[in-house]
Image (tube, coloured by chain):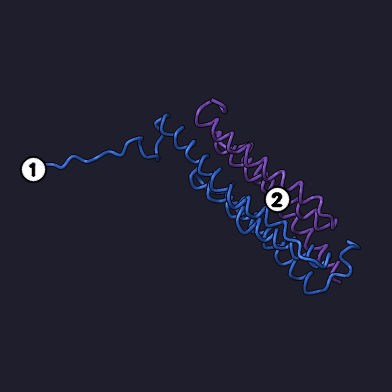
Chain colours: A purple, B blue
Amino acid sequence: MSATILSWSVGIAQLLLVAAMACCVYRLIRGPRAQDRVLGLDALYVCAMLLLLTFGIRVGSALYFEAALVIALLGFVSTAALAKFLMRGEVIE
Amino acid sequence: MSHAADLPLWAALLVSFFLLLGAVLTLLGTIGLVRLGTFYARIHAPTLGTTWGAGGMLIASMIFFSVTQSRPVLHEILIAAFVTVTTPVTLMLLARAALYRDRTENNDGVPPFRPVIDEPSGD
């Protein structure tokens, strides 16, 4: 009973997160300017991190948590570097 | 989902509630990312996913692993703290970069570099 409830809710949550990632990809492709694309990428990696957490709950292993942590770290660095690039035209001055 | 067969019903309901809450809020944030009109309006939308979207997912994960392993599993707090700290930093950097670009190109709808100080008329 509880396994059925859990598998359905994890599946629905994964579908909703994939729809959210599709919205982010739309903004990443269509975004009229560069900052819109960077914003779409930022939201995309947050959605990917949450999707990995739902995979961890589905499989029941804590390995996915570490992958989610790495995605969160790298996403922060990449968005900060891209924002610096938009501002200055170069990343390391 | 054989590992979840011995999960009590209350834990399954609680995990499902927080999972769906997080997923729905994340989806709402990204729908705002698609639908809103200007960049400065759009930059507010995905923060819905990074606050309660990520929060709901992480609470669900904490409850699930704490109940199945019958010990407190709290390492999801790391992701929660990290996302909470870094999201305002990155989005403010991005908004300042966008504002700088709009100002240098003299676009409409952004304030100029220096605020225009009105001279007092007459004396």
Q: Secondary structure at mark 1?
A: loop
- Horizontally, residue B3 falls left or right of residue A78, namely right
Q: Secondary structure at mark 2?
A: helix
Q: Taking A91 as reference, is B29 above or below it?
A: below
> Which sits in the foreground, B88 or B16?
B88
User: Image quarter for residue A74?
Assistant: top right
* Mark identifier at residue B123: 1
Q: Residue at x 66, y 59 (%)?
A: B24
Q: Residue at x 80, y 68 (%)?
A: B67
Q: Amino acid at mark 2?
A: Ala
> Which sits in the foreground, A60 or A18?
A60
- Horizontally, residue A4 falls left or right of residue A37, namely right
The residue carrying mark 2 is A19
Q: Taking B118 as reference, is A62 above or below it?
A: below
Do the residues at discs 1 and 2 belong to one chain? no
Q: Amino acid at mark 1?
A: Asp
Residue A52 image point, x, y percent? 76, 50
- Horizontally, residue B120 falls left or right of residue A66, namely left
Q: Residue furthest left?
A: B123
Q: Chain of mark 2?
A: A
Q: How crowded is the residue under tag 2: few (<14 C-alpha within 10 Å), some, or many (20+)?
A: some
Q: Residue furthest front?
A: B71
Residue A1 image point, x, y percent? 86, 72
User: Image quarter for residue B10?
Assistant: bottom right
Residue B52 image point, x, y percent? 62, 59
Residue B71 image point, x, y percent? 80, 66
Please identify, in this view, whether the residue under mark 1 or under mark 2 is nearer the observer.
1
Q: Taking A81 as reference, is A53 above or below it?
A: below
> Which sits in the foreground, B95 or B23?
B95
Q: Residue at x 9, y 41 (%)?
A: B122
